[in-house]
Image (cartoon, rainbow, N blue to C red):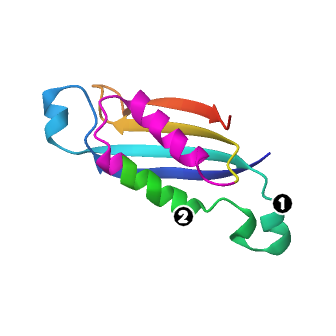
Amino acid sequence: MDQIFIKDLTARGIIGLNDWEREKEQEIVMNVTLWADLRAAAATDSLEGSPNYRTIAKRLLAHAQEAQRYTLEALGEDLAAICLSESGVERVRVRVEKPGALRFSTSVGVEIERSRG
């Protein structure tokens, strides 16, 4: 299966359990791999046969900015569902990170992989 990837898509939103995390937007970094059959898009040199990664990226950004989830796990699950709702996406891997969330670490995050059906 072919892959489309979206690397370091960055949003600002409310994420976290602590009171201070609920008051101020934080950086949320998303990395997504989509599995789809891209042969039709390649043969026609057109995006008609491919999931529209621009549309997917816009939906992911909007959700991350608006969801106000408490956990990265829940946000990751949301983002995976958004990707799988797009025509042609058979499988997805979503990595969601909060840079600077842990002292002495550049980032903390989760990685979720889901398949259609």
Badge 2: residue crowd in 10 Å (few <14, some 14–19, many ≥20): few
From the image, tell me which residue sits under label 2. 54
Query: Residue at 71% of width from left, 61% of height from top?
Result: 50
Q: Is residue 67 left or right of residue 90?
A: left
Magenta stretch: dominant secondary structure: helix
Q: Does 27 appear above or below 62?
A: above
Residue 8 in the magenta stretch? The answer is: no
Give residue 15's position: percent from left, percent from top: 28, 36
Give residue 110's position: percent from left, percent from top: 47, 29
Give residue 22's position: percent from left, percent from top: 18, 36
Give residue 44's position: percent from left, percent from top: 82, 73
At label 1, the amino acid type is: Arg
Q: Does 115 appear above or below 82?
A: above
**Numbered badge on residue 84:** none
Magenta extent: 64-87
Placement of the N terminus among the 4 image quadrants: top right
Where on the picture, by quarter, is residue 94? top right
Instruction: Tell me the distance, in whole angstroms, between the alpha carbons under discs 1 and 2.
Output: 19 Å
Placement of the C terminus among the 4 image quadrants: top right
From the image, tell me which residue sits under label 1. 39
Query: Residue at 22% of width from left, 45% of height from top?
Result: 25
Q: Is residue 24 left or right of residue 54?
A: left
Badge 1: residue crowd in 10 Å (few <14, some 14–19, many ≥20): few
At label 2, the amino acid type is: Arg
Q: Is residue 84 left or right of residue 64?
A: right
Secondary structure under tag 1 reads helix
User: Quick check: can you spot residue 9?
Assistant: yes
Where on the picture, by quarter, is residue 69? top left
User: Quick check: can you spot residue 108?
Assistant: no
